[in-house]
């Protein structure tokens, strides 16, 4: 059991062997290809692999892993490259293993409300396919139109529906996984309840491609709710908006979406889109976007009315109801565009903090205060119902990249605040390359030691996505 | 990293040291005490420990673990002793660590819908306490009136509500755990979304006390549904009852309970209780018990009516509605008493199989056929909505214990059938001592190897509940 820092290089012989395994046309060493796979959606990261390989089958992936394990070549598995933590980047060189050709939905089992899929299927494609049969796969990250379901499993993604329906982990029943030594296992069974030994399935979910390459995925599905309603509530006081979030749950409602966007983010996005439909008065401090869904429209109307009534005790502006499908889509689009907009105006680092729901106002307040103290600008938005707040920051006079010492100071202060509120570093993006230097803030060395030992159990040669989450 | 089979004995010096740690009155070596902790609810198991210790605090448990780890003494953590797989039995002697004095609910956080509790709290007590505040903790195993919440976590318990609300794992946010070397960690954070390194929390859940001793538990809660309705449907054909189960979900309903009891079990239980309320005609093949819950009575009535209407296409008897709280309680009591009744008439071994929901008819049919082939009697009942079927068997002329070779042959045949249907050995009871000989049927050696390595990562001296789930 060794920690290997000295990896072998990908030489011509290895390239030939890879071509034998997957076919000549699916092995790439040209600069353009390497460069295309050198980044994901994380800021300022660029790590070209030595070779890009695009296998089609489990057997091919098994053969690749056997080869690389034997030759001590690092392998970085990668989905659509939409990650926000650098987890799919080949920062140690070696083989970039793209799952883009494992892109078939293998079986939709209507009788059991399950779908078996390959990892390279786009999340939205999967959602739409099962929807045709009246079934629902809820976890939909902002990038759902481009991200892969395999990547979602790697990061344990969430999205706006998680507040009612849970995250990816809550839908994964069973996984086919190629282990670093090339052996292929199923982690569990296609069942709703499982108490048969250690939970390998949910250990793989969220492990960011460090324990095995997921090649088949069995997801549970639920009946598609027939109706939904969407409401926007402008708050004049940010803290009250935060309080209202937990108040809604305490009154017994479970919205299918409960998003918060604070004024700094609203102002930025309102300048970038031509949407007169969105109310933004001078005294707005934050918007809550509230969605309810279900099978009975009368109940939804009644619920939404009751929620509206509940909120009148706060200092709010005029409620805005999205009346039809188009208005709803526009409102959601606006919400989804927030991250994009703030990024374009120069807020360069996005964090993915999560705290207990009711601590959200304290988190936002605290982060703003830290911004003043450490001299950085900050905008907040996110899945308020889950306590999952995305924070984009920008610090003048720094390169605004994760390795920067000044920026690191800000981030450490921010994560210490998050930890103090009972929260943690990442709710749905993962740790990858960019957060691993901060893990000591939220957990003991003993936790990291256990994780390292688990990594060694799966990957004694440390060849699969090495150096992500932690260093061995 | 060694596999220790030669453990040290608990001598007088160790007993003295234990007394120093927890106080003299909480260390027991008298035969009566040892005998009381020698069994759980599994048939025919009797393993007295060398000493019973009843600590009160995390610190005391940490000190016990340090001592035993150093001296190589096996430690068996134990909750209420209601387990059905022998996981809390000290079959290697050593220290029996009872969590019964860690019995406080530490904090009900209404703002965040969370409860922090010690492991020795009775599940029903916890449910009732949070209910007073309008909150709901759904997982309620049949033994909820006596089992501990810590034991539920150890086994990843389910219960009848799991079909709508999920199992214990779906409610555990964070755990304080004493590791085998005495170190204390929190496994995660008190948050609804977590993507910050490997998921240690859900690795501990279902690990049957082999990886650490859980000393504090943070559970998420949900708003308590205001109403429920309960209906009993007699089926004249067992396979149709099974089909109806998946039909209900396919029509878009998600009942909060969906239980199946087949005729052999019904006949036994009807002889034992004086319940004329339960319809049992000559042509009954099975009962489905269907519960719906929610916040709007009109919707529930409509849903239940629609489900009833849906079922008229099958060959069913007269629907029976439980009209008031008392009738509901009686019906559930009857369901809960099934296991007890069949046990009393001599069905001695209970299995906890689980298959994809729609395979339930095939499972029941297959098990009955195997009963004829291998000459054992069998009754079935369980959480049909989850595909989780409890099967009690009895074989004439054998001691009807798990070690018996004839019985083992029956069980292997049954588990092979379960595996063939896409299912597995245990849905909610765990593997413990009694199922570990059958793990090879449902998983590869590679899976077991990973589990063993994980065990070694947590417990290199193999002193914590050794030999449960698998042998090292």
Image: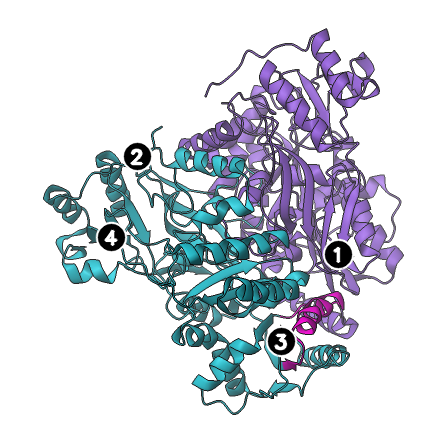
Chain colours: A cyan, B purple
Residue under label 1:
B136
Q: Are marks 3 and 2 on the same chain?
A: yes
Going by the image, does B235 lie left or right of A423? right
Residue under label 2:
A4
Q: Which type of secondary structure does the marked residue at label 2 adopt?
A: loop
Span colored in magenta? A233-255
Which disc is residue A290 wearing?
Answer: 3
Q: Residues within 10 Å of mark 3 (few under 14, many from 20)?
A: many
Q: Are marks 1 and 2 on the same chain?
A: no
Sequence-first disc among 3 and 2: 2
Nearer the observer: mark 1 or 2; the answer is 2
Q: Which type of secondary structure does the marked residue at label 1 adopt?
A: strand
Nearer the observer: mark 3 or 2; the answer is 2
Disc 4: host chain: A
Taking depth in this image into account, of A31 and B286 the one nearest to the observer is: A31
Q: CA distance from mark 2 to mark 4?
A: 26 Å
Q: CA distance from mark 3 to mark 2?
A: 49 Å
Nearer the observer: mark 2 or 4; the answer is 2
Disc 2: host chain: A
Sequence-first disc among 4 and 3: 4
Using the rendered image of the protein, determine whether residue B13 is visible from the camera's viewpoint.
yes
Which disc is residue A55 wearing?
Answer: 4
Decide whether residue A325 is among the magenta residues. Answer: no
- Which residue occupies the extreme top position in the image? B12
Q: Position of residue B459 (x, y in %)?
A: 54, 26
Disc 1: host chain: B
């Amino acid at each position: 059991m060794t920690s290997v820092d000295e990896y072998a290089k990908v030489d011509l012989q290895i390239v030939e062997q890879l071509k034998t395994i997957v076919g000549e046309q699916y092995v790439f060493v040209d600069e353009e290809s390497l460069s295309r796979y050198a980044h994901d959606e994380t800021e300022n990261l660029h790590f070209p692999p030595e070779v890009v390989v695009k296998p089609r089958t489990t057997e091919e992936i098994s053969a690749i892993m056997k080869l690389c394990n034997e030759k001590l070549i690092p392998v970085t598995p990668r989905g659509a490259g939409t990650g926000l933590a650098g987890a799919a980047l080949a920062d140690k060189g070696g083989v970039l293993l793209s799952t883009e050709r494992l892109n078939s939905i293998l079986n939709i089992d209507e009788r059991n409300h399950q779908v078996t899929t390959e990892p390279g299927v786009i999340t939205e494609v999967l959602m739409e396919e099962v929807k045709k049969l009246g079934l629902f796969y809820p976890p939909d990250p902002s990038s759902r139109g481009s991200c892969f379901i395999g990547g979602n499993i790697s990061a344990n993604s969430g999205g706006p529906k998680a507040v009612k329906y849970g995250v990816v982990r809550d839908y994964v029943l069973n996984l086919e996984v190629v282990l670093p030594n090339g052996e292929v296992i199923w982690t569990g069974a296609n069942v709703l309840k499982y108490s048969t030994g250690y939970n390998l399935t949910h250990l793989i979910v969220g492990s960011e491609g460090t324990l095995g390459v997921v090649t088949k995925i069995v997801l549970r599905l639920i009946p598609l709710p027939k109706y939904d309603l969407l409401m926007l509530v402008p708050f004049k006081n940010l803290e009250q908006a935060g309080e209202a979030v937990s108040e809604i749950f305490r009154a017994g409602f479970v919205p299918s979406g409960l998003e918060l966007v604070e004024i700094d983010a609203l102002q930025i996005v309102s300048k970038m889109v031509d949407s007169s439909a969105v109310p933004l008065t001078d005294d707005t401090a934050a918007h809550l976007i509230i969605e309810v869904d279900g099978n009975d429209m009368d109940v939804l109307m009644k619920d939404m009315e009751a929620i509206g009534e509940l909120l009148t005790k706060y200092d709010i502006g005029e409620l805005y109801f999205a009346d039809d499908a188009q208005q709803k889509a526009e409102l959601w689009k606006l919400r989804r565009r927030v991250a994009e907009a703030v990024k374009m105006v120069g807020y360069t680092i996005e964090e993915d903090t999560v705290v207990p729901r009711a601590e959200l106002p304290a988190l936002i307040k605290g982060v703003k205060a830290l911004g003043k103290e450490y001299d950085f600008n900050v905008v907040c938005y996110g899945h308020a119902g889950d306590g999952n707040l995305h924070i984009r920051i920008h610090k003048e006079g720094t390169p605004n990249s994760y390795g920067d010492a000044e920026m690191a100071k800000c981030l450490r202060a921010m994560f210490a605040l998050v930890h103090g509120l009972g929260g943690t570093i990442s709710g749905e993006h993962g740790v990858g390359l960019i957060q691993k230097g901060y893990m000591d803030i939220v957990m003991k060395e003993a936790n990291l030691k256990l994780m390292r030992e688990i990594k060694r159990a799966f990957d004694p040669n440390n060849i699969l996505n090495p150096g992500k989450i932690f260093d061995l």
